[in-house]
Image (spheres, rainbow, N blue to C red):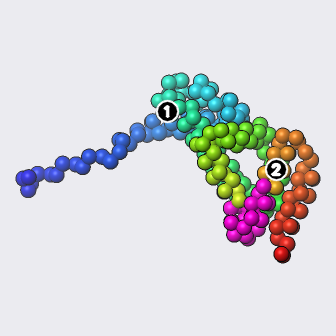
C-alpha cells in the first residue's frame, strides 16, 4: 500500500441507513396502524386500512413491513408503551387508587381494542411477548406506587385486581363506585402488616 493512499473504507456492518423520507413514511404507517388498533382492534388493521389512514399507496405497507403480523406487532408494542406512559403519568399525578377514574375517562372503543389485542396475544408468540411486557410494566408501576419490591406477590395481586376491574368496566360497564371500593380493599389488604 502506498503510504499516501487512503485506506479503503471498511465494508458496512449492516444495511445502508434508511432515507429520512422512508423513515417518515414508515413512522406514518405505524402511527396509522396504532390508531386503527386503538379504535377498532385487531380486525381493523388491514394493509388497505393502514394505507388509507396514512394517505399512502397500498404498496407502501408491504414495502415497509414484511407482513401484517410485523405491522401488528410493532403497532401493539407502540400502543403498549404509550399506555404504560399514560398510566405512569396518571398514577404520579393522581395516585394508584384513582386508576378507575382513568379507565372511566378513557375512550371505550380504544380500551376494547386493547383487550382484544391482549386476548389475541395468547395465540401469537410475538404479541405474547409484548403483552407480557405490558403486564410486567403494570406490575412494576403498582409495586412502585405501593413501595413494594416488584417481585412481591402483593403487587401482582393488586395489578390483577386492577385488570379485572378494568375489564369489567369496559365490557360489562359496571359502576365505577364498585371498582373504587374493590381497589381500595385490594390496596388495604396489600399494605396490611402480616
**Residue 1 versus residue 154 in the image, above or below:** above
Q: Which residue is mark 2?
A: 164
Residue 123 % position (x, y): 65, 38
Q: Which mark is residue 66?
A: 1
**Residue 131 versus residue 138 in the image, above or below:** above
- In the rendered view, does 88 fall on the left or right side of 187? left
Q: Residue at x 79, y 60 (%)?
A: 158
Could one spot residue 102 in this view of the protein? no
Asked if residue 40 lies in the magenta stretch, the reply is: no
The extreme bottom residue here reads 193
Q: Which residues are magenta?
A: 140-160
- In the rendered view, does 174 fall on the left or right side of 136? right
- In the rendered view, does 37 fall on the left or right side of 155? left
Q: Quadrant of the C terminus?
A: bottom right
Q: Quadrant of residue 150?
A: bottom right
Q: Residue at x 26, y 46 (%)?
A: 11
Q: Main secondary structure of the magenta part?
A: helix
Q: Quadrant of residue 157?
A: bottom right
Q: Nearer the viewer, residue 164 or 71?
A: 164
Amino acid at each position: 500500500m502506498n503510504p499516501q493512499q487512503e485506506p479503503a473504507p471498511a465494508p458496512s456492518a449492516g444495511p445502508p441507513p434508511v432515507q429520512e423520507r422512508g423513515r417518515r413514511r414508515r413512522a406514518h404507517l405505524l402511527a396509522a396502524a396504532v390508531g386503527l388498533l386503538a379504535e377498532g382492534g385487531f380486525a381493523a388493521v388491514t394493509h388497505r386500512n393502514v394505507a388509507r389512514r396514512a394517505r399512502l399507496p397500498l404498496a407502501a405497507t408491504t414495502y415497509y413491513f414484511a407482513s401484517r403480523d410485523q405491522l401488528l406487532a410493532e403497532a401493539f408494542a407502540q400502543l403498549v408503551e404509550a399506555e404504560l406512559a399514560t398510566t405512569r403519568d396518571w398514577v404520579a399525578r393522581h395516585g394508584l387508587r384513582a386508576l378507575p377514574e382513568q379507565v372511566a375517562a378513557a375512550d371505550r372503543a380504544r380500551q376494547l381494542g386493547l383487550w382484544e389485542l391482549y386476548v389475541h396475544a395468547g395465540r401469537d408468540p410475538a404479541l405474547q411477548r409484548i403483552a407480557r411486557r405490558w403486564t410486567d410494566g403494570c406490575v412494576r408501576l403498582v409495586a412502585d406506587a405501593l413501595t413494594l419490591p416488584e417481585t412481591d406477590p402483593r403487587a401482582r395481586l393488586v395489578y390483577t385486581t386492577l385488570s379485572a376491574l378494568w375489564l369489567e368496566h369496559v365490557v360489562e360497564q359496571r359502576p365505577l363506585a364498585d371498582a373504587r371500593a374493590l381497589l381500595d380493599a385490594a390496596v388495604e389488604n396489600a399494605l396490611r402488616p402480616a
